[in-house]
């Protein structure tokens, strides 16, 4: 075995010293992780809004203030309340939960349509938020995924838009569930009449689950196991924020050793075991660690790292994670395919629209 006596010690030195460096220079990320850990593990109070701001502000080196963030959210909340008061009987719906369903409709209208409200002799105008097709996955600039960016520019994506929608629902004390699809987040609500229905902000519509299934990237196994098209609990929603923290860390420190990222993945998976994005990120990070070991040991082939116990354990873990994704029926949708899918959803809105959803336009 090549360098058998020193491999283990070199592996330990390589990763522990990198970890010590990262802990010293990335304390704000570690502190944010601790707060999310306390929320999930110890039940300490941390709302989804606070978790989102914590993660985004950490990625921006704590340049913002929660007060400013809350003020911008409150602007929408105030407009929604005014619009709701002026449209008390505008919704064609007769369930006992009329008031809550109307409030959801008011949120949707305020975010998706130009809103004009006469208030104290002035006309308040709020333009709709728009989907930003530039860097939709935050590949070039991670802040493109932020609610903070959406509030500042009026442009967002399928990450920031449903996050903002849920934050507003929480502020108004009405139920709201995030739901997942490949590369995508959307909203699920339940009404007394009609049951569950989807709210899609990227196309300002109420599509049926069929529009997700039609993409071809959601397998029957994934639906049956609740990987996609299912409602998320509050802890599962916070788990999304934990993974956002890990991804923000990766973008800010691309040469990190992977230890912090895997800790975040493990925390998210403890409270959301079937979170495919966390499983995938952990698998990819494990591969990155194996490749670093391969370079350090000057191995020709990656699998040679299995000659040492640390490499064998990491190799087995990585393959187990990829096998888990396979059994879940996971399929990764290419970015261009995703853009085409979003575009078709908008242009073929009537084809996939749930006409029974409260607030949907009837024929």
Image: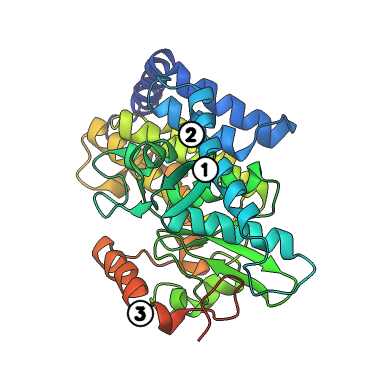
Asked if the residues shown at circle 2 and circle 1 are in contact, with their CB atoms under 8 angstroms apart, the answer is yes
Question: Is the N terminus in the top left, top right, bottom left or bottom right quadrant?
Answer: top left
Q: Are marks 1 and 3 in contact (CB under 8 Å)?
A: no
Question: Who's the residue at 30% across and 69% down the image?
Answer: 343
Disc 3 to disc 2, C-alpha distance: 33 Å
Answer above or below: position of 271 versus 333: above
Dot 3 surroundings within 10 Å: few (below 14), some, or many (20 or more)? few
Residue 80: horizontal and vertical position, in percent?
57, 49
Secondary structure, mark 3, is loop
Q: Which mark is residue 110?
A: none
Q: Residue at x 73, y 65 (%)?
A: 98
Residue 114 at what x, y percent from top left?
A: 41, 55
Which mark is drawn over residue 348?
3
User: From this viewpoint, which residue is outermost toward the front?
Assistant: 121
**Among the 4 quarters of the image, the one containing residue 239:** top right
Instruction: Identify the element where label 1 is drawn.
Output: helix
Closer to the eye: label 1 or 3: 1
Figure check: 139 above or below 201: above
Q: Residue at x 72, y 60 (%)?
A: 99
Instruction: Choose the circle earlier in sequence order: 3 or 2.
Output: 2
Question: Mark 1 sits on what residue?
Answer: 76
Q: Residue at x 62, y 67 (%)?
A: 90
Asked which secondary structure carries label 2, the reply is helix
Q: Nearer the viewer, residue 152 or 27?
A: 152
Residue 41, image quadrant: top right
Q: Mark 1 to mark 3: distance in Å?
A: 29 Å
**Numbered tag placed on residue 72 in the rendering:** 2
Q: Nearer the viewer, residue 21 or 15?
A: 21
């Amino acid at each position: 075995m090549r360098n058998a006596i020193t491999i283990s010690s070199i592996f330990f030195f390589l990763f522990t010293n990198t970890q010590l460096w990262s802990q010293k220079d990335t304390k704000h990320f570690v502190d944010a992780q601790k707060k999310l850990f306390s929320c999930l593990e110890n039940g300490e109070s941390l709302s989804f809004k606070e978790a989102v701001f914590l993660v985004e502000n950490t990625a921006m080196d704590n340049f913002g203030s929660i007060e400013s963030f809350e003020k911008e959210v409150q602007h929408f909340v105030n407009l929604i309340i005014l619009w709701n008061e002026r449209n008390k009987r505008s919704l064609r719906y007769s369930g006992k939960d009329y008031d809550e369903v109307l409030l959801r409709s008011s949120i949707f209208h305020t975010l998706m349509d130009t809103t004009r409200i006469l208030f104290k002799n002035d006309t308040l105008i709020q333009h709709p938020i728009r989907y930003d097709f530039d860097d939709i996955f935050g590949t070039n600039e991670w802040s493109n995924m932020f609610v903070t960016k959406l509030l500042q520019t009026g442009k967002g994506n399928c990450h920031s838009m449903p996050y903002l929608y849920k934050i507003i629902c929480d502020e108004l004390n009405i139920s709201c569930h995030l739901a997942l699809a490949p590369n995508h987040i959307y909203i699920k609500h339940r009404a007394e009449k009609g049951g569950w229905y989807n709210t899609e902000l990227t196309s300002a519509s109420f599509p049926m689950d069929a529009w997700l299934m039609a993409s071809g990237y959601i397998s029957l196994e994934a639906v049956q196991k609740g990987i996609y098209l299912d409602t998320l609990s509050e802890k599962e929603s916070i788990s999304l924020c934990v993974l956002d923290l890990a991804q923000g860390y990766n973008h800010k420190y691309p040469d990190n050793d992977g230890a912090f990222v895997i800790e975040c993945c493990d925390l998210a998976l403890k409270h959301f075991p079937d979170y495919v994005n966390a499983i995938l990120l952990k698998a990819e990070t494990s591969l990155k660690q194996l490749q670093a070991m391969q370079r350090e040991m000057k191995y020709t082939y990656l699998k040679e790292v299995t000659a040492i116990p640390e490499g064998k354990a990491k190799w087995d873990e990585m393959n187990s994670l990829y096998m888990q994704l396979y059994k879940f029926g996971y399929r990764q949708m290419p970015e261009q395919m995703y853009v085409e899918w979003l575009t078709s959803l908008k242009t073929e809105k009537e084809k996939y629209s749930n006409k029974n959803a409260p607030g949907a336009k009837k024929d």
